[in-house]
Every structure is written in C-alpha cells, then in structure tokens.
Image (cartoon, rainbow, N blue to C red):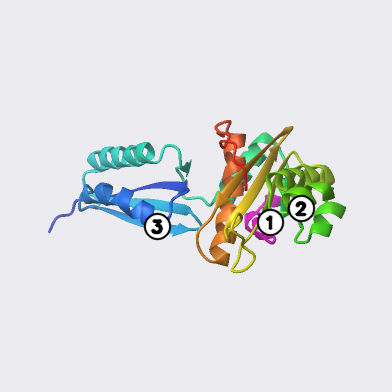
C-alpha cells in the first residue's frame, strides 16, 4: 500500500447569463477532457452558475499545474460572463465592491418585490453599504414616493425604460445613495401582452451620475423571473463598478 500523501486543489468560477440547457452544451466537451482525478460540480439558479473543480492527486506540482490550466480554460470560455473566480454569491461580490469603493446602494423594486434587498441583507456587514429599498409595486408609490412622472407612466407604461430610469434616480435621491438598482416588469403568470409578454423586465441601474437601462425577456415561472431579474440588476451594477459595463443596444419596447 502506498504511503504517499495526496494533495487537494480547488478552483471556482461563478458566471451569469446561461440557462442550464445552454451551459450543458458548452460544458460537454470541457468535461470530457477532465482527468479522472478531477471532479466537477455545476449548480445553476436564476441564470447564475457556480462551477467548482476539486482535484486530488499525490503529485502536488502536477496537480496544481493541471488545475490552473483547467481554470484558465474556463475563464477563456466564459470571459464575458464571469462574475468571480472565488466561491462567492453575487450579493457578496457586489457588497465587496461597494465596500472597497466606500459607496452606498439603494433599491427600487417593483416586479422583484424586495428580493434584491433580501439577497443583499443575507450578507453579514451589508449595513456598511446598503441604505434601504422601496418596494414600489403600485404606480401611486412609483409616483408619490419615488417621483416617477405620471405622464411617463401614462405614455410608456409602468414597464418601460423611462420608468425604470426614473425609479433608479428617484430612490437614489430619496436615500442619498451613490448607486441604485430599479426593477419593473411582468413576473407572471398573468399580466403579459403581445408587446410585453410575461418575463419582460426593464432594469435601471445608477452609479454616481450615470444611469443605464436594459430590457430583458426572462424565461421560466414567476419565481425564476424574479430570481433572474434580481441577479441581472446586481450583475449590471457589478460591471459598472468594474468599468467593464457594455451598453445594451438601443431597444424599443414596442
């Protein structure tokens, strides 16, 4: 029996934006190339995927080299979708960025119903940067509390670029925050129309004086849409804080 000690090496990558089906096709070739001493686990929820690799081998240097190569390969595959190379949640990553930069954040949530605030407060120490949230489910709250223009709501609808942008600006002004995330959409199962089907969400994100908006059509049931919109808004702000946010092409929501 061999007395050689084994070494264990772990590598992680968290990415955003892929469905389980899309990911399965991308990962099939990668997984087929793994040596037998490296095990991989993939967990996905709300378009967030955590990929973890654990390698166990007696040859420590060889193992480290191989794990680094595999890790680099994953970083190349998911260069644009990568959120972190550590085993962390999206709210943890966002919180660390806000703390490092000494910035504060507030949320204006319609379709996500307070879920972004719930996620961010699960992180210990989030009171350092999270000021508060307005769950502006009704148009009256959007207008009376956040200062969204009633003419914008009447002309463009509550689920629109204009309203998402004004919600983000309004909650930031209300809370005196540096950053803000706003969500307005149709989580379902009812409420969709031909032009704005269930899963349609406008997200507005503010960082200092810049406000950006994105229109996304999420797939899945009500909870999946809420989770996906929650993560999407946080990832947008993460990218803005890292200066690698790419503006979405101008989209009309008609």
Chain-order first, disc 3 or disc 1: 3
Under circle 1, the secondary element is helix
Q: CA distance from mark 2 to mark 1?
A: 8 Å
> CB under 8 Å between callouts 3 and 2?
no
Q: CA distance from mark 3 to mark 2?
A: 33 Å
> CB under 8 Å between callouts 2 and 1?
yes
> CB under 8 Å between callouts 3 and 1?
no
The relative height of residue 75 versus residue 192 in the rendered view (above or below) is above
Q: Position of residue 227 (x, y in %)?
A: 57, 59
Name the residue: 43% across, 55% down: 19
What is the crowding at mark 3: few (fewer than 14 residues within 10 Å), some, or many (at least 20)? Answer: some
Q: Which residue is mark 1?
A: 117
Which label number is shown at residue 20? 3
Q: Is residue 121 magenta?
A: yes
Under circle 2, the secondary element is strand
Under circle 3, the secondary element is helix
Chain-order first, disc 2 or disc 1: 1
What is the crowding at mark 2: few (fewer than 14 residues within 10 Å), some, or many (at least 20)? Answer: some
Name the residue: 37% across, 52% down: 23
Name the residue: 65% across, 60% down: 115
Q: Which residue is mark 2?
A: 132
Q: Tell me if I can see residue 65 in this picture.
A: yes
Give, as a single range, the part of the protein colored magenta: 110-126
Q: Is residue 14 magenta?
A: no
């Amino acid at each position: 029996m061999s007395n050689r000690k084994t070494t264990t090496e772990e590598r992680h990558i968290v990415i955003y934006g892929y469905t389980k089906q899309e990911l399965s096709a991308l990962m099939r070739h990668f997984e087929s190339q793994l040596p037998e001493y490296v095990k991989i686990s993939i967990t996905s929820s709300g378009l967030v995927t955590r990929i973890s690799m654990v390698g166990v081998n007696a040859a420590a240097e060889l193992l480290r080299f191989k794990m680094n190569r595999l890790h680099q390969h994953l970083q190349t595959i998911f260069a644009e979708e990568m959120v972190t190379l550590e085993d962390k949640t999206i709210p943890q990553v966002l919180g660390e960025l806000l703390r490092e930069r000494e910035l504060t954040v507030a949320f204006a949530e319609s379709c996500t119903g307070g879920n972004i605030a719930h996620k961010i407060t699960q992180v210990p120490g989030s009171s350092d940067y999270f000021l508060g949230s307005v769950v502006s489910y009704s148009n009256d709250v959007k207008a009376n509390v956040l200062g969204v223009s009633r003419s914008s709501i009447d002309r463009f609808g509550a689920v629109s670029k204009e309203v998402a942008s004004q919600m983000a600006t309004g909650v930031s002004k209300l809370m005196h925050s540096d950053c803000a995330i706003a969500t307005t959409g149709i989580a379902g199962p009812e409420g969709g129309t031909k032009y704005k089907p269930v899963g349609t969400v406008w997200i507005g994100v503010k960082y200092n004086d810049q406000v950006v908006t994105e229109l996304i059509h999420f797939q899945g049931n009500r909870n999946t849409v809420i989770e996906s919109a929650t993560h999407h808004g946080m990832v947008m702000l993460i990218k803005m804080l890292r200066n690698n946010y790419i503006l979405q092409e101008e989209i009309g929501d008609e």
